[in-house]
Amino acid sequence: GAVVSQHPSRVICKSGTSVKIECRSLDFQATTMFWYRQFPKQSLMLMATSNEGSKATYEQGVEKDKFLINHASLTLSTLTVTSAHPEDSSFYICSVEGEGNTIYFGEGSWLTVV
Amino acid sequence: GENVEQHPSTLSVQEGDSAVIKCTYSDSASNYFPWYKQELGKGPQLIIDIRSNVGEKKDQRIAVTLNKTAKHFSLHITETQPEDSAVYFCAASYGNQFYFGTGTSLTVIP
């Protein structure tokens, strides 16, 4: 299966600043990556589908100007949380669509906005 | 769209016993059904999956069954061990559209 790496695993930022989370597919060229958000003791909420070389597709209710997604290469997608607020604090997880539509997840990134 | 329901939300079993988690789905077009294990503070890890042309798949202590007619699939863990304690998510997929269940928190009591 695909190996997916996320960085950073934990980040604390001040309210009003922006923070970038990277998702790398280490052994598979991924034309499609997904970004999820997960609140404590809840399921995964799909935020957007990241497409290499084109604009991301956002789910209903997700602010595209707040959660900027860039998928500039087949191995890297980035999620930038702009003008972060405490309510943006969450666990953000990316995933890669591998062969046979199999989905492999990264280890996740904990964001705390203070 | 697809609707995936997962039961139970919490499950406690004695070490050595079996655990069964069930999911139902609504869209008959779904043809891929993975199961993920998520440990605290980590991303979900694929543990087993099944496609719609197969009724059952087994990998050591883990097995998944699929009933396409009834639109339900189940995860079976035998001889449970404390390290099996985690949250388990099912998913139903068609193409690159994935729909996750709400998760089952499994606790294996030593």
Image (cartoon, coloured by chain):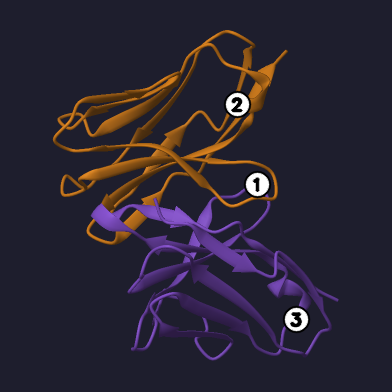
Above/below status of A52 relative to A3 = below
Task: Indicate the chain coloured orange by its letter.
Answer: B
Distance Cα–Cα, label 3 vs label 1: 21 Å
Q: What's under tag 3, amino acid-wise?
A: His
Number of the label disc, if any, that sits on residue A85: 3
The quarter in which the N terminus of chain B is drawn is bottom left
Secondary structure state at the residue bearing disc 3: loop
Q: Position of residue B6 (x, y in %)?
A: 44, 36
- Mark 3 vs mark 1: tell me if same chain: yes
Q: What's under tag 2, amino acid-wise?
A: Asp
From the viewer's perspective, is A88 left or right of A5?
Answer: right
The number of numbered badges drawn on the structure is: 3
Distance Cα–Cα, label 2 vs label 3: 36 Å
Task: Indicate the chain coloured purple by its letter.
Answer: A
Q: Position of residue A98 (x, y in %)?
A: 33, 59
Secondary structure state at the residue bearing disc 1: loop
